[in-house]
Image: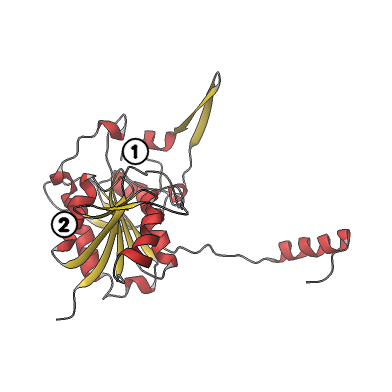
């Protein structure tokens, strides 16, 4: 039997959230866990980074006065041992669709890890409520599905070579039910329905994509993360972090025209 895994755990809801406590305690039964998480809620902060952050010891590990990206950099470069894996979560609220990949602090922690060449898992729990997450009253038992599937992935994904084909996994989980939910490997939905309405000197931003999560009416196609979650399945999207570059002839022709027009010298 080999040495236990070294895992860095973080989140964006803050170190005092129920989700990170439940997940870190479950993983601690199987691995050496170092928690480095924001001291306060940093939801939807993306990959914002700081130049300097305060850090204090916490009963779970380290509380950082900064963002999830700060926590990953601090944890990987200074506060923890070299980890085999970074786990972000469990987030209260789903992170679904292409447009949230750069917005979510939970996913951004996984992306930051990928640039360190450390594989990562970002786990979020869908909360199917009509109004807002602030009205959700989630207890330890609600996270049972999230901890079960994340623990499973931690135990098996590395050995099976999953991260030879993906930099990180975006895992979205329905609330725990009477039986374990099935899993589907998905792609992020391409739906984008942000809007804005002006009211005097203010503008109210809306995300209408959440208005159509009824499994009977959801417009997202089969194979997407949104449809899987709406229909009660665990969604796992294997993703890559670095942005790709797509060279094409039209842009090459356009840049050549620029050189001819302005008289730029050859590169």
**Taking 90 as reference, is 251 left or right?**
right
Which residue extends farthest left? Answer: 178
Please name the residue that numbered disc 1 is placed on: 213
Task: Residue at 40% x, 67% y: name it.
Answer: 167
Q: How is the image coloured?
A: secondary structure
Image vertical order of residue 81 relative to residue 59, above or below? below
Classify residue 16 by image quadrant.
top left
Image vertical order of residue 265 relative to residue 35, above or below? below
User: As rendered, which of 48 and 98 lies closer to the eye?
Assistant: 48
Please name the residue that numbered disc 2 is placed on: 25
Tell me the element at label 2.
Answer: helix
**Taking 99 as reference, is 149 left or right?**
left
Q: Which mark, by number, is residue 183?
A: none
Q: Position of residue 13 (x, y in %)?
A: 31, 45
Q: Position of residue 225 (x, y in %)?
A: 36, 51
Classify residue 121 by image quadrant.
bottom left
């Amino acid at each position: 039997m080999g040495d236990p895994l070294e895992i860095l755990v973080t989140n964006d809801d803050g170190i005092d959230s129920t989700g990170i406590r439940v997940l870190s305690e479950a993983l601690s039964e199987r691995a050496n866990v170092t928690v480095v998480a924001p001291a306060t809620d940093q939801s939807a902060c993306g990959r914002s980074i700081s130049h300097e952050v305060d850090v204090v010891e916490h009963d779970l590990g380290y509380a950082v006065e900064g963002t999830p990206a700060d926590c990953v950099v601090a944890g990987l470069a200074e506060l923890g041992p070299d980890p085999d894996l970074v786990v972000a979560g469990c987030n209260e609220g789903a992170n679904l669709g292409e447009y949230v990949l750069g917005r979510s602090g939970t996913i951004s922690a996984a992306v930051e890890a990928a640039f360190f060449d450390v594989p990562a898992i970002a786990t979020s729990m869908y909360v199917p409520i009509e109004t807002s997450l602030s009205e959700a009253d989630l207890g330890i038992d609600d996270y049972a599905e999230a901890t079960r599937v994340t623990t499973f992935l931690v135990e098996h994904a590395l050995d099976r070579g999953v991260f030879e084909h993906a930099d990180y996994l975006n895992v979205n989980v329905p609330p725990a039910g009477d039986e374990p939910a099935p899993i589907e490997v998905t792609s992020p939905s391409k739906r984008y329905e942000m809007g804005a309405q002006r009211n005097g000197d203010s503008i109210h931003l809306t995300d209408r994509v959440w208005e159509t999560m009824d499994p009977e009416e959801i417009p997202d196609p089969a194979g997407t993360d949104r449809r899987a979650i709406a229909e009660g399945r665990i969604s796992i999207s294997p993703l890559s972090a670095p942005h790709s570059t797509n060279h094409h002839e039209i842009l090459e022709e356009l840049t050549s025209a620029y050189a001819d027009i302005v008289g730029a010298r050859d590169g």
